[in-house]
Amino acid sequence: MKIASRMENLSPSVTMAITALARELKAQGKDILSFSAGEPDFDTPEVIKQAAIQAIKDGHTKYTAVEGTIQTKKAIIKKLKTDHGLNYELDEIIVSNGAKHSLFNLFQCLIEEGDEVIIPAPYWVTYPEQVKFSDGVPVFIETDDSTEFKITAEQLKAAITPKTKVLLLNTPSNPTGSVYTKEELLSLAEVLKDTDILVFSDEMYEKIMYDGENFTAVASVSEDMFQRTVTINGISKAVAMTGWRYGYVASPNKALIKAMTKLQGQVTSNVNSITLEAAVAALDGSADADIETMRVEFEKRRNVAVESFNAINGISCVVPKGAFYLFVNIKEIGGDSMKFSADLLEKEGVAVVPGLAFGTEGYFRFSFATDLPTIEEGIRRIRKFVEENFA
């Protein structure tokens, strides 16, 4: 049996591989602290659990519409209107099995052979893999600490070619926590004017913002950007519902939503019917107090982690404005992120993700989506590792 050649060009997820390895080592009895997974350690809010239990009791256990129930789509529409002043109709929304699934459907429906997708680096590991799987060409714009890992209008203009189909933005960012301001988004929007380039805006971490900063939805900055922006979002991160698998897309392009529905109908059909019911409570404000409680705790953890890392000679990190990651700079001590991460796991039992996995060497990603004592112990071990091996 020969595996299809298209699979040869698809790389496995490094973040998932490291997380799985850390779990395996821990199961073997080894003292492992993992900061590799992008998963909140909080439980799903009780109001959402109860909504799911009630859904089961009420018999919501059958097939639903492929694109999502009217109730869940109305909750998304209301949320986007309330939070960002954006107006969508029912046939401009589709619910999928997580934002990763939403992105896959988008690329499959829009990208043809040779189409270019501009992706700022560092990037979430899935982006370029899905572009390549769809016969597209990922085009990377390099960033670093000096711009808080955000691209400039000048960089975007230089990256555009006649083959450019999509600009993919992720704000707040995985893996850096960087957040684009309204002014920065407007400068990018100016470059895109009079082009046919779409913007895929991954806004999964929009509720996890720090220092009193307000999140700006990409589609909200101008009418032109609204028309060209495809918003991808979900409830995995901010509402601690990673295992529930619920992502959604909002776009004024009804033909695109129709195409995605056609594809999804032949691949997965509808999202889990219980999740669809429970998601309403995650979107309609019922869980807002729980979301804020988690956000406040994430901010405390961020502050401790940033201060602790920046006190270690040879490494540093910028202060993220959102999400729950630090992208830690190790260039001063060699910058080989794969070796650093492998040695750190072997010698100190600490799992982090090498920056190379996100397309940017010289860094590692540290997730602070875990409890404070674990964070403090993990950074203590990292300090020990750096002092003993790079002094």
Image (cartoon, rainbow, N blue to C red):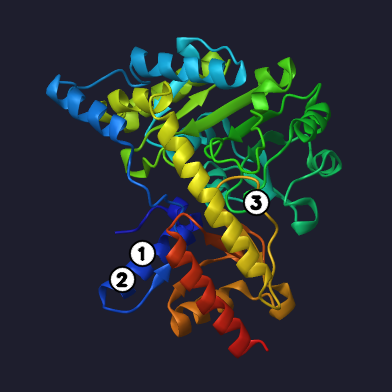
C-alpha span from label 2 to label 1: 6 Å
Say if residue 358 shows up in the picture. Answer: yes
Residue depth check, mark 3 versus mark 1: number of the one nearer the observer: 3
C-alpha span from label 3 to label 1: 26 Å
Label 3 sits on what residue type?
Pro
For image coordinates 20% across by 23% down, the residue present is 55
| Callout 2 touching callout 1 (CB < 8 Å) | yes
| Callout 3 touching callout 1 (CB < 8 Å) | no
Q: Could you say where residue 180 lies in the image, as x and y percent from the top left? A: 71, 39
Q: Could you say where residue 89 lies in the image, as x and y percent from the top left? A: 50, 9
Q: Could you say where residue 253 lies in the image, as x and y percent from the top left? A: 57, 16
Looking at the image, is 96 positioned above or below residue 383? above
Label 1 sits on what residue type?
Ala
Q: Mark 1 — residue?
A: 20
Q: Earlier in the sequence, mark 2 or mark 3?
A: 2
In the image as oriented, which residue stretches furthest toward the top? 89
Q: Is residue 50 left or right of residue 193?
A: left
Label 2 sits on what residue type?
Glu
Q: Earlier in the sequence, mark 3 or mark 1?
A: 1
| Callout 2 touching callout 3 (CB < 8 Å) | no
Please rate how many residues cluster around mark 2, counting C-alpha atoms within 10 Å: few if below 14, some from 14 to 19, many from 20: few
Where residue 24 is drawn, which disc sits there?
2
State how many labels appear: 3
